Amino acid sequence: MHNPKQVALAATLLLPFSTTQTVHPLSGSNWTLSDPGSNVSVPATFPSQAHLDLHAAGIIGDPLYALNEFEQRWVAYSNWSYTSPPIPGLSTNASSTWLLFNGLDTFTSISFCGQFVASTNNQFRQYWFDVTEILQACSNETHRVLAINFGSAPNIADAIANEPGQETWPFGVQQVYEFPNRWFIRKEQSDFGWDWGPAFAPAGPWQPAWIVQLGSQAVHIRNSIVDIYRQGQLNLLPPDQSQPWVVNASLDYFGNLPDNATLTYVLNDLQNHTISSGALSDVNTTNATITGSTIIPDGTVDLWWPSQLGPQNLYYITISLQSSAKVSLASVTKRIGFRTIVLNETPISDAQLALGIAAGNNWHFEINGHEFYAKGSNFIPPDPFWARVTPQRIEQLFQSVVAGNQNMLRVWASGAYSPDFMYDLADEYGILLWSEFEFGDALYPVDQAFLDNVRAEAEYNVRRVNHHPSLALWAGGNELENLELMLVNQSAPKQLAKYTAQYETLFLNTLLPAVFENTRSISYTPSSTSNGWQSLNFSATHPIMERYNNLTTGSVYGETDFYNYNPAVLHNASALPIGRFSNEFGYHSMPSLQSWRQQVLASDLTFNSTTVLLRDHHDPAGGLNTSNTANSSIGQAQMTEAVEMWYPTPGKRDAVANFSAWCHATQVFQADLYVFEIAFYRRGSGLPNRQLGSLYWQLEDQWVAPTWAGIEYDGRWKVLHYAAKDIYEPVIIAPYYNVTTGNLSVWVTSDLWEAVSGTATFHWYDWSGKQLDMNTTQSVAFEVGAINSTQVLQTFTTDVLAKYDLTNVVLHMSVEAQGRLPNTNTTRTFRHDNFFNPTPLRTAQLIDPGLTLTYSPTTAIFTITSTRGIAAWVWLDYGEGAVVHFDSNGFWLLPGQPREVGFTVQSDGTGGAWVNTVTVQSMWDQTQATSVGSFANGTANGTGGSGAPIAYTGTAAKTSISVLVIVAAALQILL
Ligand code: BMA
């Protein structure tokens, strides 16, 4: 907990009239966690949360195991104290002594040397307290103990809700998951339960803290902001890219700043070569913040780009604070990038109209002045306990994000503000983080104390992370305008004006200025999802006038958020929303058997066991009922219906194998649906709605449960993550089918920044892989414009398939195009394959494709061959103990065209033995009583059927695909 070097410094340097500071970190493992109420006192770590220390001490089991979520509710209802050992090395000569906390979760009463210091009530704020007098009166070193008493957040939320005159909302507006009243408190909203996670309402010092001692002329920098923008830039408006860069920096401090202090900067590249340095100009000091700025000429630095759009160029900037006598007082170094990122919601221009873009407003992002297609997903808190989320875990997730061809994550609004290390990693990996203030699926109070608390939280976080080039946007909260205000309108239409005014008080009058008064470089939108703004007026106190429902028929506005749990929505394009950007959509699926085994008893491994049911929080219990299987049965039924509607029903003899096959089937439906939706949204880039983003719900899991995630809790990819990776390739070919009319069209979509040309090919087969003699185009030469789509086939299945049995036809389509990734000079070939079958696989005449699997240790390549027929949803599976990401998975395979698959190992507790557990199966195997791929006993189960366990080979087979090319005219479409 204590760094002896600093003790020495403290003893020698902390003289009165000095400019020095000593920082004593409070992190360590020698704290105590106690609750006199429940008679618990155990060793604790700092930072931490009570559940983690209680689990480490053996007082409670693993919170994520079985139904411990419910068993451990007493922890959330207790009050917990974190007590330090006596803190050594504090100087009594210091001019001032401060406590500095970067995060206390949530309601605390803090004492030092047995004296009350302060109370806190916001998980997301930084707090600092002057304890000079307390320390001066605390001469006995053994009394220098810091104690932080955390009150029960659920109890306090209830107490606030019951205060006389407290705000209330119309019926059905406030979304309750488990613990009620989350909207009264500034704590991670999903701590009180959500539809993909447990409700632990944890308490504890979740971020680091320090004791800071200062000389009389010394300051400590507690927070800082570096804002980089093009001269003249305004939030929300595309800037002039020829303007020089403005670097505006300010340091937030406590202590005594000597008069006439100055600021200097040094800008270095990552090799520490100085690019620019000097004094900051226009230095001014207000409210314990000192600010200055400088100009960096355009062209001096290389731009930062998101993944696949260019290099992630980064720099270090050091801002130093000196006294007028040039004595160094403090400095801050931040790693930064130069880019502009704007959420463009401007009206559609005449030039855009002339291109065929529908009237209305834009709603898309522009990086360095370029439109781009945002491909990604929604990030939820990766663990119910943030205190144990390490940079390594985030890095592994981000590796999956980038491997999945994603360039943007929406960091959803009811978790916690992301740690600095998360933005650092996003900067390195090129992942844009659409960031949100922590408000969601509820309306919030607007009394002055609440607003002041929110404002302080927002200022701290906006300033803390603004320098990261990965920061893409600030949004006020989740589903506010298009859900919450709509619910008010449904439930109590007469009160809509009142609650809209309250909404504007919080999201336009409180949060917006917290962004615009601190940064010029970042756009703000009050709500995800919304119809965007109607007008902007930067000189008004209220710069954004929201559009709400002032819509003109035929015009297109804003983002879309779409959920429909009727599985018939798959392939029903008319159900999907037409907007400019899709920020959420999805359907839940089961995690794999391998993941289930990590968190439930073997006896619970059935689809509707009580434990599985009660871990499905969709539909949520809506309260504290711990045996609410009624609502969760709805979610389980939705998955079951989806499988029964679309796929052959699993029919494994072994009960656990059958459970595994069902879990897998729900994942296939999820993947199928998301691919359909993503292809639909991406095609919109070439349609009048000029659709420029698709972020599905949700990237990852925070425990093992049925959820919308594509990545399971330990990092294993569901079918979804592989399927999304495939449909997020830069150039894709995809079918669009209207089951009622038989209309089938095939489109190529590209999000490259230059037009690409190539060839699309089409071949029809029966399930045995025999090519059918169809009277349709076999090959089309096409050109598709920058970020655009083009139709390459239009036909009616009713005509072309008239003489065939629809249950026995499969269309294979592929595209090959020459082009360049943005900001690269090399032309490369982009390829993509897709399959279409006109009936659900449930009724298709699937045959045993006779899959074989070989592995070459020399090349670390798996080769999968279909020997007898077309294999749908080929799935490489592997046992527990490792997390491995195959280069591709969940694909379809034509007979005689082997597929080579490499892999990346995320973690391996098997010493490499996982390789021997790899199996391959396809949709056909789902119905086979004893085929492989079930891992019923932890290792591959059974040997019958088509699915194959592994065979080793010295040399990997080579894939050879020959295509017949018949040139046809490219089809011209909009844009
Ligand atoms: C939207 C999200 C989340 C939720 C998800 C699935 O409502 O914003 O609140 O978890 O859908 O229901």
Image (cartoon, rainbow, N blue to C red):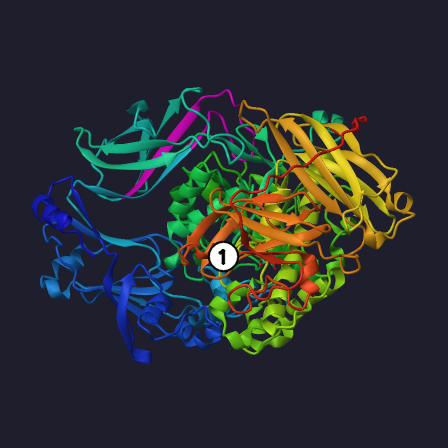
Q: What residue appears at the point 77 percent right and 34 percent down from the top-left corner?
A: 791
| Spot occupied by residue 315 in the image (x, y as percentages of width and height) | 37, 31
Quadrant showing the C terminus: top right
Magenta residue check for 948: no
**Quadrant in which the N terminus appears:** bottom left
Tell me which corner region of the image, top left, top right, bottom left or bottom right, holds residue 680.
top right
**Could you say which is closer to the camera, residue 818 or residue 582?**
818
Residue 471 visible here: yes
Task: Give the farthest residue toward the front.
Answer: 954
Residue bounds of the magenta highlight: 228-253
Q: Position of residue 566 (x, y in %)?
A: 73, 61
In the picture shown, does residue 681 fall above or below 815? below
- Answer yes or no: is residue 495 visible: no
- Counting from the top left corner in percent of width and height, residue 817 is at 67, 29
Is residue 712 found left or right of 106 in the rendered image? right
Residue type pointed to by label 1: Asn
Q: Is residue 69 left or right of residue 325?
A: right
Q: Position of residue 836 (x, y in %)?
A: 76, 47
- Residue at the spot of label 1: 916
Q: Residue at x 33, y 61 (%)?
A: 48
Q: Residue at x 88, y 48 (%)?
A: 741
Name the residue at 75% across, 62% down.
645
Tag 1 secondary structure? helix
Residue 808, placed above or below residue 253: below
